[in-house]
Amino acid sequence: MKQHTRYNTSVLPEAQFEPGSRDRVLKNKPGIKRKREIDEAESVALAVATDNLLRIYDAAHCFRAEDIKTMHKIWLGEIYEWAGEYRQVNVSKGDFPFAAAMQIPLLMAEFGKSSLRKHTPCNFKSHERVIQALAEVHVELVLIHPFREGNGRVARILSTIMASQAGLPILNFKDITSKKRKEYFASINRGLSRDYKPMERLFEKIVEES
């Protein structure tokens, strides 16, 4: 992927929210209006999807971009109409812009041919090689941010399955979603220059504590 075409800044259009949710919940199939309820629905669906996906993808599976869409669809298909489809809006986190929506199909195709082909199946004999694979794939997928919602969690599902391919236990991401959240986003940012070392250190810790 060429660096100068990867992360274009643009204004995020207004999201389509569920009526009556006070613009806090995206429009969804069950008609959920409360943020706490939609979070719970997504969490429950995530646990079920992760169990199912660990059975679908075995230790010999080489992932493709289409598999990432399938993961998203299996997870959120009962909640959002657009589950499994690449986003059509540009998004950012604070001052950090993710890939422009119009670039996502190309970027995901390149991601499949480069990082996914290089690092999966993640059944390498060297522990260091496994950590490198987990870090690079995770960073690159999050930077593309292909979906409207749930990108970090899809990236964690993929990391969990890759770890399983390597014979590792189910990964515990609790730290990066709480006390190490700032360190995690800083590590993602470093990926813009292809520096995956910070994320490798985080994955080392994640594996140790899993």
Image: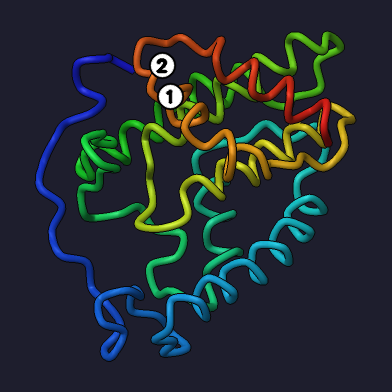
- Residue under pointer 1: 186
Q: Closest to the observer: 6 or 107? A: 6
Left or right, residue 137 beside residue 165? left
Question: Where 130 sits versus 28, above or below?
Answer: above
Residue at 56% from the left image edge and 41% from the top image edge: 155
Q: Closest to the observer: 42 or 103? A: 42
Q: Residue furthest left?
A: 11
Q: Amino acid at mark 1?
A: Ala
- Residue under pointer 2: 190
Give the label, 1 or 2, closer to the camera.
1
Counting from the top left corner in percent of width and height, residue 200 is at 63, 16
Residue at 73% from the left image edge and 30% from the top image edge: 206
Question: Where 37 sits versus 70, above or below?
Answer: below
Given contact means CB atoms under 8 Å apart, are the residues at marks 1 and 2 in contact? Answer: yes
Residue at 29% from the left image edge and 43% from the top image edge: 93
Q: Residue furthest front?
A: 179
Question: Where 35 sits versus 187, above or below?
Answer: below
Q: Which quadrant is the N terminus positioned in? A: top left
Q: Amino acid at mark 2?
A: Arg
Instruction: Please tell me in which quadrant of the rendered image residue 62 appears.
Output: top right
Counting from the top left corner in percent of width and height, residue 28 is at 40, 80
| Secondary structure beneath label 1 | helix
Instruction: Report the colour scheme.
Output: rainbow
Mark 2 Cα-neighbour bin, 10 Å: few <14, some 14–19, many ≥20 = some
Counting from the top left corner in percent of width and height, residue 18 is at 30, 83
